[in-house]
Image: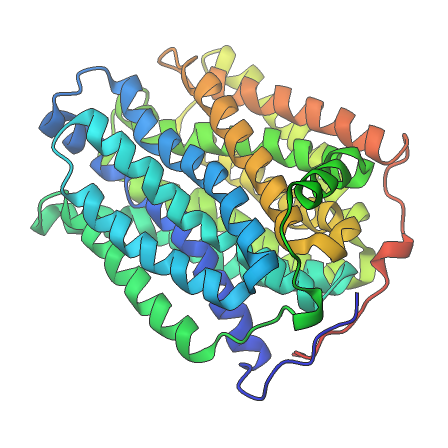
Amino acid sequence: MRLLTPPRTVPGFREFVALIAFLGALQALGIDAMLPALPTIGHALGITDETRLQWIIATYIAGMGAGQLFWGILADRYGRRPIMLIGLALYLLASALSALAQTELTLLACRFLHGAASASAVVCRSIVRDLYSGRRMARVMSLTFIVFLVVPVLAPSVGQLILVWLPWRWLFGSFALAAALTLAWAALRLPETLHPEYRLTITAGHILHSTRVVITDPLSIYHTLAMTLLFGWLIAYVASVQQIFADVFHRPELMPAMFALCASGMGVASWLNARLVERLGMRVIGHGALLAFIAITAVHWALARAGYETMASFVIFQGVSLACLGMCSGNFGTIAMEPLAAIAGIGAALQGFISSVGAALIGALIGARFDGTTAPLALGGLLVGVASLLLVLVAERGRLFRPHHAGEIIEAGPLHP
């Protein structure tokens, strides 16, 4: 695929990375800022079963998965920029509707719509793929992931601060404000990256062909499924972390700070990945991180099952596990997108749909096993790690740590650091 020469209004490399990251970070904002508010929302809406509160998170993620198909198809037909702007406007509207919900069912419906609107961020992956490939693309995605992680690190604390001064419905007002600011930034600075000659006429045949490519190419489908499993464990952690700090450690007020401390491991890992991936390659780093994730979660499970878990050990093990997951995600995502240059929009959407919906189900399954200890979460991490390793082995034909692949040739886009 020929790389596009964008208009002169294209932002510089640093601004481009920041803009793409913030566009994607709206998804995380809709999840993580909600965590401190879940007990308050449950009390306000009469939700007595704490496990049911996890569906406020799960329905949002399911909406993300369903919406990605819609946005990805439209982005291949009408271009990246207009679809991104429309998605941001709908995100703003969905935030307002969620704030007005009066019942549990209404809130869940609004959260599904909210997630579907936030799924327009899938276009970010298409924009990056329009401009970059291979290890260069992995570096850009790692850099955006660092900025992306600022939101989940800070969001619970921001959410808790809002709850101190304002009713919980104002959380959705903060989502709307963030969407409005990002919409203005994107409208002023985001260029169109899809060349007119690559815009596709969307037909049933095209969708079927694209689906066939995504689900039959080994690199695409197996790395997508591996990311789905790992993302599912992450969702289980995010959805249950408030309950863990309340019921296991009896310190719910410490959750935002400890959550931020754990998430900082992903930020450090993404920074290291961005520094090293062009030299070492996606597979060396990604495969090594996955093996480390399996080992760490195995030790964590054994410790928790034996009854020796403390808040300090939980934060340490979760922080290191999340760091490994951060290194896996950017590299596996890049490898999965490599064969899909000609169908980047719908390809990213299909992969995102599989990952989001599958991960929401896996996350709900792991979260439902909560038994008053951290052992089920650690065991869930171990199981998804082993299953992910098997999938990667199939994709790589039984060989890990390959130092080079033909698809990893760096194609430098028009934006350079």
User: Which percent across, then down, holds residue 38?
Assistant: 23, 32
Quarter of the picture holding the N terminus:
bottom right
In this picture, residue 27 sits left or right of residue 195: left
Residues 137 and 259: in front is: 137
Place of residue 349 in the rendered image (x, y in percent of width and height, measured from the top left): 58, 46
- Give the answer, above or below, for where 34 lies relative to 140: above
Q: On the picture, is 299 further left or further right than 38?
A: right
Q: Which of 103 and 259 is in front in this view?
A: 103
Position of residue 291 relative to residue 152, above or below, is above
Residue 8 appears in view: yes
Q: How is the image coloured?
A: rainbow
What residue is shown at x 70% (from left), y 36% (from top)?
290
Above or below 95: residue 39: above
**Quarter where residue 310 is shown:** top left
Q: From the viewer's perspective, tell me whether residue 324 is left or right of residue 314.
A: right
Q: Nearer the viewer, residue 83 or 381?
A: 83
| Residue 142, position as x, y percentages in the image | 62, 58
Residue at left offset 11%, top offset 32%: 102
Residue depicted at x 63% and y 19% = 383
In the rendered view, does 396 fall on the left or right side of 191?
Answer: right
Q: Position of residue 183 (x, y in %)?
A: 36, 67
Position of the C terminus by quadrant: bottom right
